[in-house]
Amino acid sequence: MALFKRRPAGRAGEWYYCLKHGTVEEGPECRAADRMGPYGTREEAAHAMETARERDEEWRNDPRWRDEGEGGKTAD
């Protein structure tokens, strides 16, 4: 049994998107492994999944991160 309860890291005024609950949260509510952020505003946090999809798509199409063949070499 733990002697001290660990509080999630974060501060009031910082906004997070909780992956576990699918909600926007202010400050340290859920554990860090279950959330994305911090974001500057509630609106930014509300669009966290959309932002992540857009960034993923950008990285997927970035020639610097593409494998050129089975050798696993990437473009410089």
Image: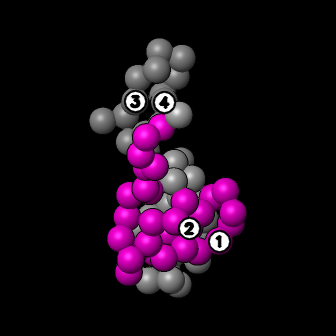
Q: Is residue 37 left or right of residue 76?
A: right
At label 4, which amino acid type do we have? Asp
SS class of the residue under badge 3? loop
**Residue contact at pointers 2 and 3, CB within 8 angstroms:** no
SS class of the residue under badge 2? strand
Residue 37 sits in quarter = bottom left
Tell me which numbered mark, 1 or 4, is placed earlier along the sequence: 1
Front-lying residue, 1 or 32: 1
At label 3, which amino acid type do we have? Thr
Give me the residue at 41% from left, 67% from top: 38
| Res 17 label | 2
Using the numbered discs, state the Cα–Cα distance from disc 1 to disc 2 in whole angstroms.
Answer: 6 Å
| Res 74 label | 3
Residue 58 appearing in the image:
no
Tell me which numbered mark, 2 or 4, is placed earlier along the sequence: 2
- x, y percent for residue 20: 67, 56
Q: Is residue 65 left or right of residue 57?
A: left
Crowd class of label 3 (few under 14; some 14 to 19; many from 20; radius 10 Å):
few
Give me the residue at 54% from left, 17% from top: 70
Tell me which numbered mark, 1 or 2, is placed earlier along the sequence: 2
14 magenta-colored: yes
Give me the residue at 56% from left, 67% from top: 17
Above or below 2: residue 29: below
Crowd class of label 1 (few under 14; some 14 to 19; many from 20; radius 10 Å):
few
| Res 67 label | 4
Q: Which residues are magenta?
A: 2-30
| Res 23 label | 1
**Residue contact at pointers 4 and 3, CB within 8 angstroms:** yes
Tell me which numbered mark, 1 or 3, is placed earlier along the sequence: 1
**Residue contact at pointers 1 and 2, CB within 8 angstroms:** yes
- x, y percent for residue 16: 50, 69
SS class of the residue under badge 1? strand
